[in-house]
Image (tube, rainbow, N blue to C red):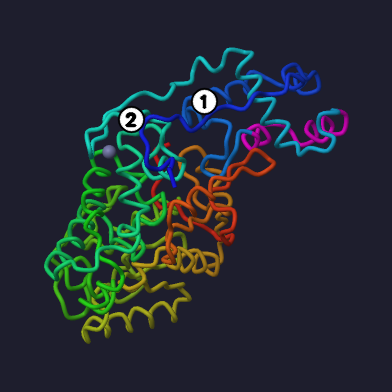
Amino acid sequence: MASKYRQRDESLYTEEPIDEKYSNDPHILSWWTDTHDLILITRIKRYRWLWHKGVADRGVSDDILDITPEATITHWRDIDPLCRGRTIKKVLTDFARSRARDAGLLSHLRPAEWKTCKLCGEPFIEDSLPLPLIRRIGINQIVFCGPCLTDIFFNDVSVRGTQDIAHDDALSYMRELASILGYVPPRDFGTTPEDTASLTTEQQLAIFEVLQRRPSIQRVRELFGSWFQALVDAGVLEDGTQQMVLGTKCLAKDGHVCLSLGEKTIDDLLSSLGITHNKEVLYPEGNYRADFVARDLFIEYLGLAGNPDYDAKTKLKQRVCKKHGIKLLLIYPKDLIARDKLVDKMIDALIDGGEAYEPTQARTRAHGQLSLFDGLERDSDSSTDGTTDDNVSHALDYDVNGQLYLFPDAPISRQLLLFPPRW
Ligand SMILES: [Zn+2]
């Protein structure tokens, strides 16, 4: 099929005309304020031509509803004929579009520009990239063309990985990936947009060059037995018997000194979840220190689990915790390669610890910079059963609310953005 993923000069985001009846709807204008205009301007600046769509799981109507008293909305919905037979989100989205046009707010829109692809050197127009590709690099740093990104993320070889990579090349792939990322690469790295959208252009360029040599899952299994073992063999992850090559001492994003890449991965994860934490906190007895304390939860990263001396010390710490009624969470190197599960584990432990930690609050607080839990968008690109252009273009469906669901058939699941995308 002549794919929109394989071209560089066609703009994919043509605007549908807006029905004139929305432009001057008195029922909305009666409660519309300067702050509402400001919301539109902010989105126009940040999301450019996608500003009224559901970006990062939120459409413009969500932002409008957020700052408008519920009673105002209820009253408006009851009296405005435009709301009959249509969802208020759809009405608000259409109103916002006409408002932006009529009030001159679109002057803040930085239109799509011609760029030169940093990978292939070909000229392309920014909005020739389908949304799943834009989501992987961020709308404000589009410097790679659609065909190049498609090759990296969506063609058969890149989705499945290369089957014939040599042992040593696979090891350097692991090390390079870890050192560019600055955290332990999870098993499924590169399959969700957030993996790369949070990176700078320079990091993206480096990562894309590395991803072009990605070994397939089968190949990793053949060579090492598992992704985890591959990371251990490459010296990225420690275990009880092997020494680390990488990151023996490194700084977490919040400035905490970490003694391994694994520790740094946990530290950065806590930060990205908005969980305040301290490092190297003393236990109430025994002169032991905990790797992390987050609220009332002690967290130990057991990098050397399997080593008898180390395991004995862990047992002692567990005993101290039991005696003093301290909640203790043990994290193993293996936990680091499945981030979704690790986050669940952390949040469950925090909630059990007494003080409730509400992910929804974190999300609200972080809104605009990062959204922690995308309930509706589940990336299905990671499916191994032939993700091709067909699946991807199917994923670009709009629903009646004007929201854009990338993967309408995907199961609803809590999705984590570990690192804020640069939208
Ligand atoms: Zn290119």
Image coords of residue 66 (percent x, y): 65, 36
| Residue, disc 1 | 44
Which SS does the magenta portion mostly show?
Answer: helix
2 or 1: tag closer to the N-terminus: 1
Label 2, on which residue? 124
Does 62 sit above or below residue 303?
above
Quadrant containing the C terminus in the rendered view: top left
Look at the numbered discs 2 and 1 and tell me whether their residues touch, using CB distance below 8 Å.
Answer: no
Kindly identify the residue that appears in the image at 54 percent across and 45 percent down: 396
Measured in 3D between alpha carbons, the distance from the residue under mark 2 to the one under mark 1, in whole angstroms, is: 22 Å
Query: Left or right of 227: which side holds 401?
Result: right
Disc number at residue 167?
Answer: none
The x, y position of residue 190, in whole percent, is: 34, 55
Residue neighbourhood size for the residue with mark 2, other residues' Cα within 10 Å, grouped as few (<14), some (14–19), many (≥20): many
Q: Secondary structure at mark 1?
A: helix
Does residue 330 lie above or below 377 as drawn?
Answer: below
Q: Residue at x 41, y 72 (%)?
A: 329
Q: Amino acid at mark 2?
A: Phe
Q: Is residue 69 above or below residue 31?
A: below
Q: Quadrant of ligand 1?
A: top left
Helix or strand or loop: what does disc 2 sit on?
A: strand
Task: Tell me where residue 404 appears, x and y as whole percent.
Answer: 58, 42
Magenta span of residues: 61-79
Which residue is at 68% across, 35% downward?
Answer: 65
Mark 2 near ligand 1 (CB under 8 Å)? yes
Q: Residue at x 20, y 65 (%)?
A: 236
| Residue 102 point in image, percent of width and height | 64, 13
Q: Quadrant of residue 399?
A: top right
* Mark whose residue sits in front, 2 or 1: 2
Identity, as a three-letter code, of the amino acid under mark 1 = Ile
